[in-house]
Image (spheres, rainbow, N blue to C red):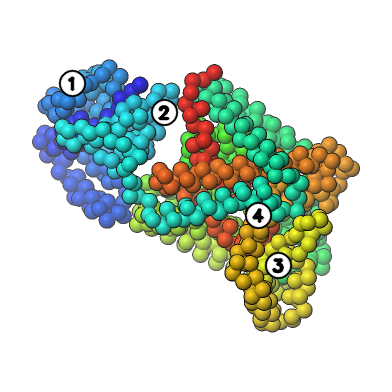
């Protein structure tokens, strides 16, 4: 057990950094030369144009004027040691820890003087530049966990709940210090004013929505592929649930051993790739449906047969133009080397690369948000999720867009608290480029960017991030302008410029349901050939929009309010309840190989598919259950770290409720679903992680 103390105004009577500045100023008047810059930066900090780290770096720039900093520090403590408060000296213990935002070089001598350990901000004593994050807020907890991974914090003393809330919550006992008065406090009873009321309301709604998904999937699964009974769904969920105590015991076992970590991560990575290759080889597909049109058009382009490009299709469905461009470039390269006969294999390899990049980005994002301890948990979820396997034989926008939302999120969590430098500018530009690419490939990728903007607004950091937002928006404008310029000079884009179906077509289609070929199951809000033909029967675009509005009004009138709410719930269950994300059905339609054991397991017409589907249903219920726990934890603890993920998922729910929908449209957001589940899983099983290793 370790007792930890904040330093300034807690056990030290004053602010040691300010005292040290004036101590140095008395000895060295050249320090005054830094004052104009320090005042300017202070004003920038006050008006939230610059962050605290930037301000403190400039404040400590006076160190450049000092030749022998170590001597100054030693002399400082000879004069100021009396400011250590008597109450602390009376209760001081051997293993006490001082953890402070003050510079490490300034507090380090206290380790010998007071016989304590010091954790503080690493600052270059010659330049004032920060070599670590400012050791305040959550960083105090992070540094403590890194320094003492197996030892709990018994007590934490601080003069400020606002500045040290996370450390006070982390310790078994929390004490508030006011000069020489020490008061034990219960952090559960102290409100955190940082979370706006709108976010709290949103979290309640978000929790209710996913809780309703869980109930619907277990007791009334609307997906066409659903072969499980309520009993089987519950058993599958329990089995997946019981897997994770073992995962957390595994985290205990490898957490402090780099060699074990490497071995375990390597084995899991190899298993993952082997499973992917098995699916690719034994369940490989010939191109079908829309993919077939794009694939054959790209092959015709590669051999110079421009008449073989289905221009009419790309005019009607412009969302697949950039899929065509990617395949056309790939096949052109293959044709140049006389390898076009391997075009299907090339799409499989490219698909494998894209999907594995998504998996890596998911792990990196989770590592940044929740620490190294959750990497194993993330790898297990990825290993179990069908989204990383079933669409490998099908090179379409579902997998091509898979890395985009998670890449945008990954960049955002890295720059969120980063000081404004070249790296932050680069990542901001990258977010803008990724958003544009995502919009061109699959429009729903933009929801991740919108979620980021909302998160910035509600974290009260818009002023600090206004430059970042400006760079992202400017990059998007430049990227769209560049692509428009390029498209205006390419014959393919000229020939497919007009003819896209009005947006009203997809909204209309999203309102209908019709019987499937599975008894008792309906297609709800999905693509409907009859409605597609109806749209084309209307002739002009103007007539199409009028016809769609008429149909929408008629359908809404027939539903009424309660009927429409019931329809939206059925549609949501149809879309969000399929743990295979319609992948098993998709790869069953155009199989190349004769039936084999892999197909029998993962294809919807397979002999053992019911077992595989029940596994996926158990996993999707577990993920949604963990997301509910995550949101409740965020609501109770008033934490904002993961709200951007919840906002993105809620935005996707709203969009797919209004638009033509399919479980397939969730594939590129599966990494986001996994990220959203991690805080909940950690909350459920963290006590296991804190036990002794076996």
Dot 1: what SS?
A: helix
Q: Quadrant of residue 418?
A: top left
**Whole-percent x, y for residue 547 in the image:** 69, 80
Please determine whether, in this image, residue 186 is positioned above or below residue 85.
Answer: below
The residue that appears at 62% across and 71% down in the rendered structure is 560
The residue tagged 4 is 573
580 horizontally vs 408: left or right:
right
19 horizontally vs 300: left or right:
left
Marks 2 and 4 sit apart, C-alpha to C-alpha, by 42 Å
Mark found first going from the N terminus, 1 or 2? 1
Q: Are marks 2 and 4 in contact (CB under 8 Å)?
A: no
Mark found first going from the N terminus, 3 or 2? 2
Neighbours of disc 4 within 10 Å: few (<14), some (14-19), many (20+): many
- Judging depth in this view, the residue of 218 and 637 nearest the camera is 218
- Judging depth in this view, the residue of 112 and 197 nearest the camera is 197
Residue 512 numbered tag: 3
Neighbours of disc 1 within 10 Å: few (<14), some (14-19), many (20+): few
416 horizontally vs 606: left or right:
left
The residue that appears at 57% across and 22% down in the rendered structure is 260
């Amino acid at each position: 057990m370790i007792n930890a103390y904040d330093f300034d105004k807690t056990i030290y009577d004053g602010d040691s950094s300010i005292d040290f500045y004036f101590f140095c100023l008395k000895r060295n008047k050249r320090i005054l030369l830094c004052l104009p810059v320090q005042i300017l930066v202070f004003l920038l900090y006050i008006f939230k144009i610059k962050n605290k780290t930037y301000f403190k770096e400039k404040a400590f720039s006076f160190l450049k004027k000092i030749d022998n900093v170590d001597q100054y520090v030693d002399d400082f403590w000879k004069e100021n040691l009396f400011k250590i408060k008597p109450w602390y000296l009376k209760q001081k213990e051997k293993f006490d820890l001082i953890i402070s935002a003050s510079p490490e070089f300034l507090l380090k001598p206290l380790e010998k003087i007071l016989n304590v350990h010091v954790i503080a901000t690493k600052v270059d004593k010659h330049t004032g530049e920060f070599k670590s994050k400012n050791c305040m807020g959550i960083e105090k907890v992070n540094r403590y966990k890194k320094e003492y991974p197996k030892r709990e914090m018994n007590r934490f003393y601080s003069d400020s709940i606002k500045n040290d809330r996370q450390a006070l919550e982390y310790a078994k006992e929390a004490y508030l210090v006011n000069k020489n008065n020490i008061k034990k406090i219960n952090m559960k009873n102290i409100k955190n004013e940082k979370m706006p009321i709108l976010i709290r309301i949103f979290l309640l709604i978000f929790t209710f929505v996913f809780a309703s998904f869980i109930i619907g999937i277990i007791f009334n699964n609307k997906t066409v592929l659903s072969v499980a009974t309520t009993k089987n769904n519950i058993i599958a969920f329990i089995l997946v649930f019981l897997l994770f105590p073992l995962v957390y015991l595994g985290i205990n076992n490898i957490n402090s051993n780099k060699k074990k970590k490497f071995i375990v991560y390597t084995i899991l990575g190899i298993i993952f790739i082997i499973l992917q290759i098995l699916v690719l080889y034994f369940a490989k597909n010939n191109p079908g449906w829309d993919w077939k049109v794009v694939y054959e058009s790209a092959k015709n382009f590669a051999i110079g047969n421009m008449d073989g490009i289905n221009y009419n299709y790309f005019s009607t469905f412009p969302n697949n133009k950039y899929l065509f461009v990617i395949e056309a470039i790939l096949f052109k390269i293959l044709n140049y080397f006389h390898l076009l006969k391997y075009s299907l294999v090339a799409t499989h390899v490219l698909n494998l690369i894209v999907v594995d990049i998504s998996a890596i980005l998911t792990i990196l994002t989770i590592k940044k948000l929740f620490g190294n301890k959750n990497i194993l948990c993330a790898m297990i979820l990825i290993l179990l999720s069908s989204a990383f396997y079933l669409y490998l034989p099908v090179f379409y926008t579902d997998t091509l867009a898979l890395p985009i939302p998670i890449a945008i999120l990954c960049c955002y969590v890295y720059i969120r608290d980063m000081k404004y430098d070249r790296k932050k500018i680069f990542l901001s530009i990258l977010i803008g480029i990724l958003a544009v690419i995502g919009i061109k490939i699959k429009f729903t990728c933009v929801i991740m960017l919108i979620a980021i903007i909302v998160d910035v607004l509600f974290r009260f950091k818009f002023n600090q991030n206004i430059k970042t937002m400006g760079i992202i928006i400017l990059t998007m404008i430049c990227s769209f302008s560049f692509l428009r310029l390029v498209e205006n000079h390419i014959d393919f884009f000229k020939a497919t410029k007009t003819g896209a179906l009005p947006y009203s077509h997809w909204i209309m289609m999203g309102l209908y349901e019709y019987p499937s070929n599975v008894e008792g199951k309906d297609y709800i809000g999905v693509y409907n050939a009859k409605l597609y033909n109806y749209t084309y029967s209307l002739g002009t675009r103007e007539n199409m929009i009028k016809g769609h509005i008429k149909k929408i009004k008629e359908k809404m009138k027939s539903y009424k309010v309660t009927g429409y709410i019931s329809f939206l719930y059925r549609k949501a269950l149809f879309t969000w309840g399929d743990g295979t994300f319609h992948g098993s059905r998709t790869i069953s339609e155009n199989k190349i190989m004769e039936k084999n054991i892999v197909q029998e397991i993962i294809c919807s017409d397979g002999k053992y598919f019911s077992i595989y589907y029940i596994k996926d249903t158990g996993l999707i219920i577990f993920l949604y259950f963990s997301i509910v726990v995550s949101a409740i934890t965020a609501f109770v603890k008033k934490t904002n770290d993961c709200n951007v993920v919840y906002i993105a998922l809620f935005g996707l729910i709203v969009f797919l409720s209004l638009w033509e929908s399919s479980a397939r449209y969730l594939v590129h957001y599966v990494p986001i679903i996994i990220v959203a589940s991690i805080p909940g899983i950690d909350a459920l099983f963290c006590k296991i992680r804190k036990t002794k290793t076996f």
